[in-house]
Image (cartoon, rainbow, N blue to C red):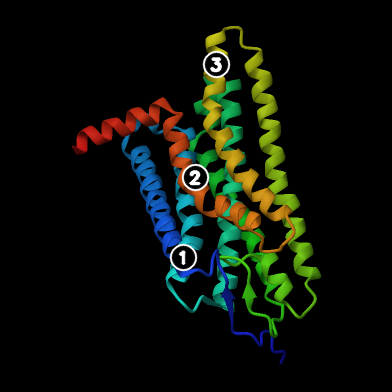
Amino acid sequence: MRNHSVVSEFILLGLSADPQIQALLFVLFFVIYILTLMGNLMLLLVIRVDSQLHNPMYFFLGQLSFLDLCHSSVTVPKLLENLLSEKKTISVEGCMAQVFFVFATGGTESCLLAVMAYDRYVAISSPLLYGQMMNRKLCMGLVWGSWGLAFTDALINILVALNLDFCEAQNIHHFSCELPSLYPLSCSDVSASFTALLCSSLLHFFGNFLLIFFSYVCIFSTSLSISSTKGRSKAFSTCSSHLTAVSFFYGSGLLRYLMPNSGSTRELIFSLQYRVITPMLNPVIYSLKNKEVKAAVRKMLRKCF
């Protein structure tokens, strides 16, 4: 039988080797993680409690909040642990598990953002038929399809990556496990895993990005045909939060994976934006730019206090 891994664990070099900076970073990321949990849980609760938010748009927004909780929780707890620990190790199995769940949750969010773009297109182009077209059965199918597609994609990538051998090198110049960070450590041929990663990135992430792009082309085309200025303004305002979320997610995510793997400061910043900051910002984006959500939050806070 073939011994697939001589190395049993990796060392995550993280963001800094200075203990004082590590202490400051721990406080910073702990606060960010708590805000992420509070913001997304509050949004889930508001959407659940307020009957005025029981429509497809907020159903998808609730799913996005749940995904942000999952996506952040895959990475941040281990990051916080390593900032406090002298031994910044992660087992090979744990590293592969983290790669899988980051890929799965990130892929699902990519699909869900495309679904939300389509939802906005239907709402603007066919407002009278919106409830009928975006019925609960279709919404559930789109969400389950997003999860299923992303987990299948992640499973294919991780099954191919499990064939990699790790012999001597242990240091990962990153705060978490990512497939591109593992390739320099492998003493076996990485071409199969790299090809699988490239194909899935092109088909999955770029495919969803194209769906979002074409949805917004149709949205802008439909909005420009609206005669009243108020109607056009309302159509654009309903999309502003989603566009902001898409910009944060795809901007940092694509820049991270298009950059060569070097462990540079810029690479770490894009990874932090993609994995840590964006999940915290999404509830803020949708709360600040959405009158219905702000009204629902105020109503809930009045009942509580």
Residue 272: x percent and y percent?
55, 54
Write the residue at 72% across / 46% down: 206
Type of amino acid under label 2:
Leu
Q: Which of the two labelled residues, at mark 3 and mark 1, occupies the earlier sequence position?
A: 1
Q: CA distance from mark 3 to mark 1?
A: 46 Å
Query: Contact, CB < 8 Å: mark 3 with mark 1?
Result: no
Residue 161: x percent and y percent?
69, 72
Residue assigned mark 3:
233
Q: Is residue 110 above or below residue 27?
A: above
Type of amino acid under label 1:
Gln
- On the rendered structure, is 79 left or right of 42? right
Give residue 158's mark.
Answer: none
Q: Nearer the viewer, residue 227 or 247?
A: 247
Number of residues whose C-alpha sits closer than 10 Å to that of mark 2, classed few (under 14), some (14–19) or many (20 or more): many
Write the residue at 49% across / 33% down: 57
Secondary element at image label 1 = helix
Look at the image and tell me in which quarter the N terminus lies. Answer: bottom right
Give residue 22's mark.
Answer: 1
Residue assigned mark 2:
64
Q: Nearer the viewer, mark 1 or mark 2?
A: 1
Q: How many marks?
A: 3
Type of amino acid under label 3:
Ser
The answer to whether one can see residue 148 in this image is no
Number of residues whose C-alpha sits closer than 10 Å to that of mark 1, classed few (under 14), some (14–19) or many (20 or more): some
Write the residue at 70% across / 27% down: 217
Q: Which of the two labelled residues, at mark 1 and mark 2, occupies the earlier sequence position?
A: 1
Determine which quarter of the picture holds residue 94.
bottom right
Residue 167: x percent and y percent?
70, 85
